[in-house]
Image: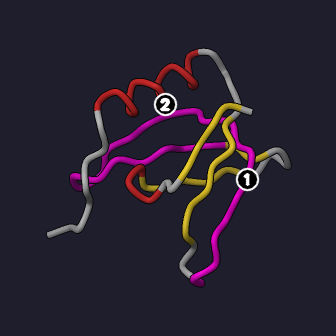
Amino acid sequence: MTDYRPIDCGLHSEYELAILQRRRLHLTWPGSDDATHRDIVKPTDLITRHGEEFMIFTRSGGETGKIRLDCIIRYHCA
């Protein structure tokens, strides 16, 4: 069982559009270290694993990351 909370379909569509348009996003999310993380990322894909949805992204330095969609606290286009 997972504690994943599905996100709004409209928000999911906005993430998909950002991927298609190759837009960068300012994301804010909680880290495992109880710190709040903020970064500008380029989302590259949305995936589903074990009933949870994730955004795959690339940071400005080239490193890739993955974040569960319901963990994103705030986002806006860069």
Residue at 44% from the left image edge and 59% from the top image edge: 71
**Image position, residue 52 (x, y; %):** 29, 53
Colouring of the image: secondary structure
Is 30 drawn above or below residue 28 in the view shown? Answer: below
The residue singled out by tag 2 in the image is 15
Q: In the image, what residue type sits under mark 1?
A: Asp
| Among the 4 quarters of the image, the one containing residue 37 | bottom right
Q: In what element is the residue under mark 2?
A: helix
Is 38 drawn above or below residue 19 in the view shown? Answer: below
**Image position, residue 77 (x, y; %):** 67, 31
As drawn, which residue projects farthest toward the left? Answer: 1
Residue at 50% from the left image edge and 34% from the top image edge: 45
Q: Which residues are magenta?
A: 33-57
As drawn, which residue projects farthest toward the top? Answer: 21
For label 1, the crowd category at 10 Å Cα-Cα, with few meaning under 14, some 14 to 19 and many 20 or more, is: some
Where is the C terminus found, in terms of image quarters? Answer: top right
Q: Is residue 63 magenta?
A: no
Q: In what element is the residue under mark 1?
A: strand
Residue at 34% from the left image edge and 27% from the top image edge: 10
Where is the N terminus found, in terms of image quarters? Answer: bottom left
**Image position, residue 24 (x, y; %):** 71, 32
- Contact check, label 1 and label 2, Cβ < 8 Å: no
For label 2, the crowd category at 10 Å Cα-Cα, with few meaning under 14, some 14 to 19 and many 20 or more, is: many
Instruction: Give the CA distance from mark 1 to mark 2.
Output: 16 Å
Residue toward you, 59 or 29? 29
Labelled disc at residue 39: 1
| Among the 4 quarters of the image, the one containing residue 36 | bottom right
Is 43 drawn above or below residue 29 in the view shown? Answer: above
